[in-house]
Each structure stands twice: as structure tokens, then as C-alpha cells.
Amino acid sequence: MSDTSDEALLVLYANGDPLAARALTLRLTPVVFRVAQRMLGDAAEAEDVAQEAMLRLWHMAPDWRAGEAKVSTWVYRVASNLCTDRLRRRRGVGLDQIAEPTDDTPGAMAHLMQADRAMALEAALQALPERQRQAVILRHLEGLRNPEIAEIMQIGVEAVESLTARGKRSLAAALSGRREELGYDDA
Amino acid sequence: MTMRDSDNRDHRDLEAALAAARTAQPQPSADLLSRIMADAEAVQPAPVPQAPRRSGLWPRTLAVLGGWRPVGGLATAAVAGLMIGYSDTGGLVTQPASLWSQTEGAEMAGLIPDDGFFDLALGAEG
């Protein structure tokens, strides 16, 4: 199963193969979950989105048309749309609502610093406009190429480039404002 | 520090943060994976029972050629060719009419509608 493509696994799944169900779950759930986690900033909501996205994949499997698209692209798109729906229904998460690390043991400072930076990035991501956040996550955290991102977001490639450029500028400015606190060196 | 130096530093810091985030990806819990597997099993179509396959060269050849009607045409042409080849004409065909009058053994017209021919062939392949 490890060398079988996502599409082949999906066809096998639609034909009743139990191993295909397991393989697809293990391959695709991490992808959907981490995108949702980064988009929503909330693990519980990310789990809901992941489960819903995968459920739609299971229902769609018998109708999958081979060769038309990548399964992963389809899954990214569904997860992104589910996240967008949720974000539109709720108010933005303020920075004050993100928990600060409480461990101040000496020797844990380096870990705290790294954790602080990771949390600072997450907070900065959450502060981005939704479409910039989505584009930055798909490009710089998922490593997808712009044409695939364009397909996922249903926009042109130039629009993707514009969103990622603006998103990165905003993130850089947000992190810059916390440089001393986060311990970044000048070197 | 110039604006350019400041921008470059900001860019480097962001790249470092993104690189760190890529190596520390959020992971789904075992509980989530179990729930998704349970959904997969609940929704999955039942396996399609496999019909017994007919093996052998003839059924596959028949399928490739498009069924017994085209094969009937081929068979007719083949037999006609045999007739021409074995007819006692001594070379070039000069009296084609006499050839086609020799039908009593060939029954060419009967080859296509004659189901017995194909039953024999199918039976031979088994």
C-alpha cells in the first residue's frame, strides 16, 4: 500500500478494500488537520473540520473520476472551504486570548523562546486576513506550488502570488515588533 | 541600520519562524484517526463479488475483435481464401465465376448465421 497513489487507494476504497481505508486515513488526516489547525488556531475545531473533510471524501469516493485532479488537492480545497465557513461564522481570535507559556524554570528558557516564537508566528498568522493566511499556510507551511494553490483557492496564480507576498510582509512586520521579546539576534 | 538591512533581518527572522513551524507540524490525535476510520468503514461500499472469469485465448480474442459477427466475417474471408488457394486454376484466377460456383463444400453464406461453427470453436477452447 505504501507505494500506491492516493487515487489508486481511493478507487480501492470505493471497491470495498478495508486496507485502502486505513491507508488513506493515515495519509490524508494529518494534512487536513494541520491546515485546519493553522487556519483556525483551535485544535477542537480543527478536528471537526478534519473529520468532516474526510467524511466528504469517503462519500465522494465512488464518484471519483480518475485523472482529473489530485486527491490531495481536492482534500486541501474541501478543508480550506470548511475553515473559511467557520471563520466567517465566528469573530476573530484576539491575541489576548492566546495562552502565554507558564513554565519559567531556568534552563527551559531556550525552549520557551522557541515556543514563544512558534506562538508568535501562530498569533501573527491568526491576525492575517483569511485569504492571506490560507495562501501563506499552503505555500510556506505545506510547501505547495502556486498553480496547485490557485486550484485549491479557485483563484489565478497571480492572485496567489499577491496574497503570499502581502501575507509574508504582514507576518514579518508582526514578528519584527516583538523582536527583543522573542530574542532574535541581529546577526 | 538601513531600511534595507532592517527588511532583510525581518525576512530572515520570518523564514526562521516558518522553517521552525514546518518541522513542528500539528499532529492529529489517535482518537481523531479512529473516528475518521470508523466513518470510512460506515460509508464504504460493500466489496463487489468477482464473477468467474473465462480464461483462454478464444474468449479474449472474441472480445478484442468485437464479438461473433465480425469474427464471422473474418471466418468467411478466411475460408474463401482457402478455397481460392486450393482451387484447381493453375495460377491466376481466369474463371472467377466457376470458383464461386463451387459452394457445396464451403457453405460460405451459412458461416455467419451458423451458430454451430462458434459453438465448436468455443468448445475447443473450453
Image (cartoon, coloured by chain):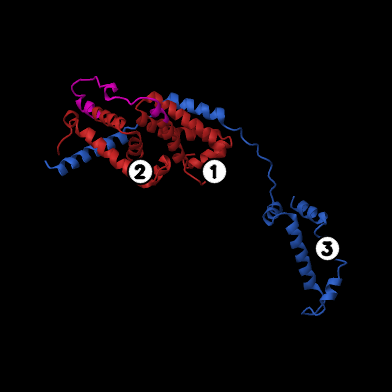
Chain colours: A red, B blue
Q: Residue at x 83, y 57 (%)?
A: B114
Q: Are marks 1 and 2 on the same chain?
A: yes
Q: Quadrant of the N terminus of chain B?
A: top left
Residue corresponding to mark 3: B109
Residue corresponding to mark 2: A160
Residue corresponding to mark 1: A65
Q: CA distance from mark 3 to mark 1?
A: 46 Å
Q: Is residue A153 left or right of residue B39?
A: left
The quadrant where residue A173 appears:
top left
Read off the chain for label 1: A
Q: Residue at x 23, y 20 (%)?
A: A103
Q: CA distance from mark 1 to mark 2?
A: 27 Å
Q: Nearer the viewer, mark 3 or mark 1?
A: 1
The foreground one among A41 and A22 is A41
Let me know if residue B28 appears in the view: no
The quadrant where residue B68 appears:
bottom right
- Going by the numbered disc 3, the residue's amino acid type is Ala
Tell me where residue B79 appears, x and y as whole percent: 78, 66
- Going by the numbered disc 1, the residue's amino acid type is Arg
Q: Residue at x 77, y 55 (%)?
A: B121
Compared with A103, A147 (above or below) is below
Whether residue A68 appears in magenta in the rendering, the answer is no
Read off the chain for label 2: A
Tell me where residue B48 appears, x and y as whole percent: 63, 36
The residue range painted magenta reads A85-114
**Tag 3 near tag 2, CB within 8 Å:** no
